[in-house]
Amino acid sequence: MKCSLLFTGSTVGSVVGTILLERIVNFLGQFYPSLDQPTYLPAVPFFDRLFTKNVSAALPCGVGYSPAKARFFSLVLGGLIHPLFFVVMGTARNYPALLLAYAIAAFARSFWTGEHLNFYVVSTPKKPLGVLLGCWCIGSFSAPLVCQTLMAEGIAWKHFYLGSLVISAIALSLTIFSFRPTRHEFLADRKAALDAMQITPSAHSPGTDTMIPLSHEEKVRDSSARPLLLALSIPYQWAFSLFAFIYSGSETTFQGFIVTYLLTNRGSSPDTVGYVSSGFWGGMAAGRILWGYYCTGSVAVHRHGLIQFLICVSFLMTILIWFVNSTIENALSSAVVGLMYGPIFPGTLGLCNDVLPSDVHMVSMAILTAVASAGSAVFPFVTGVISNMDGMRVFCYVTVSQTVAMFVLWLFFPSSLPVRV
């Protein structure tokens, strides 16, 4: 029961992060277009006097929005918050502290998995979303492998989390180096912000014209309300959201309970069973990286049938785990499930972008990300509650049912790309 409650902490952190993400990102992206040089200070009245000498008299004063600056600071903010998870986990002395740590981790991840980053990735020429998600899985593959090795050597598991702070520092440094706004991005965002300014009669100097920008909140409401309503009115948006909810819940349930299932129902060794989780994530990393490299051009046309095949193989592997009483076979099946699951989520995002109108792509990704986060928390929690009452055998019932549900739901998605008029 306590293990399943940890997923509730993740749910709370994810929900809070999803709710606050847009406001925080919009604030972090504000800047003064009238400046000749980019600044990393917040665009708030308190700092106005710092910019007085640099503001060109020929340019209007006002606040603009820079997507590059917003993306950079949101990623850095997530990189600063997430290490708190390792600190709390490494120093926790009671269960509420562990619950808080999971909430912090989910809140920080919301800044990395938000729609602004996914939309940026799919808008790049090579669209390496599968590779990006695959690299994420490499970390998930390495972590339990290293932790299991340390525990087998008699090292306390808490030291693993404290040692991970070094990885956090490296990740933060790479984020700053890779995503810092360039001069070209600043000039492009500056030009767009200046073009968005409107000329209105000055309230302080009658008879003169002063450039007054639209309120940022008004621009956000005007630009996001209509796409959101349009996205929610499209049946395919709801279908993709339901699929993402089930898939994400299935992925998290499988990797979260496979080790417990093998310990309780298969009598696996505690010293080696942790490697099964690494096998699952290793397979998923390989699947997503291969998908990112090869699912382009003509391969994307066959995406529907390919993902249908992957779901079928995943179903067969869960059946083998259910009926074959062998730790080795179950471990191999888990790795195959990870390999098959790897391309499903990036493939779903790609099909969603192809099916839905371009006007709702960013909003659609935001909805899918939020719904997927909810699924990754709800299904493991429900599975944990049921397993406390009926034993870990329900793990197989849940995973098999989820693969069947994904297979049936995928049948309703179009197998050919729509023609835009």
Image (spheres, grey):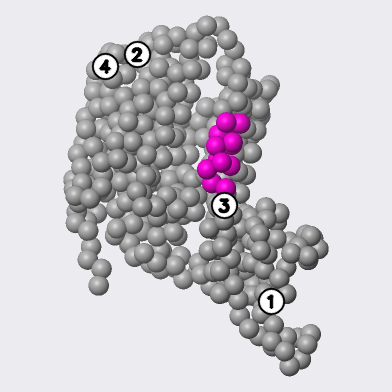
From the viewer's perspective, tell me whether residue 350 is left or right of residue 158: left
Q: Using the numbered discs, state the Cα–Cα distance from disc 1 to disc 3 in whole angstroms.
A: 25 Å
Q: Is residue 184 above or below residue 345?
A: below
* Residue 264 to residue 240: above or below: above
Q: Is residue 180 magenta?
A: yes
Q: CA distance from mark 1 to mark 4?
A: 73 Å
* Circle 1 or circle 2, nearest the eye: 1
Residue 329 has which mark?
4
Is the stretch drawn in magenta largely helix, strand or loop? helix
Mark with earlier residue (4, 3): 3
Callout 2: SS: loop
What's the CA distance linking mark 4 and mark 2? Answer: 11 Å
Could you say whether the residue bearing mark 1 is in a helix, strand or loop? loop
Give the label on residue 58, or none.
Answer: 1
Please rate how many residues cluster around mark 1, counting C-alpha atoms within 10 Å: few if below 14, some from 14 to 19, many from 20. Answer: few
Tell us which disc is closer to us: 1 or 3: 1
Tag 2: residue type?
A: Arg
- Residue at label 3? 181
What amino acid does circle 1 point to? Ala
Please indicate whether residue 254 sits to the left or right of residue 89 in the image.
left
Q: Which residues are magenta?
A: 168-181
- 198 magenta-colored: no
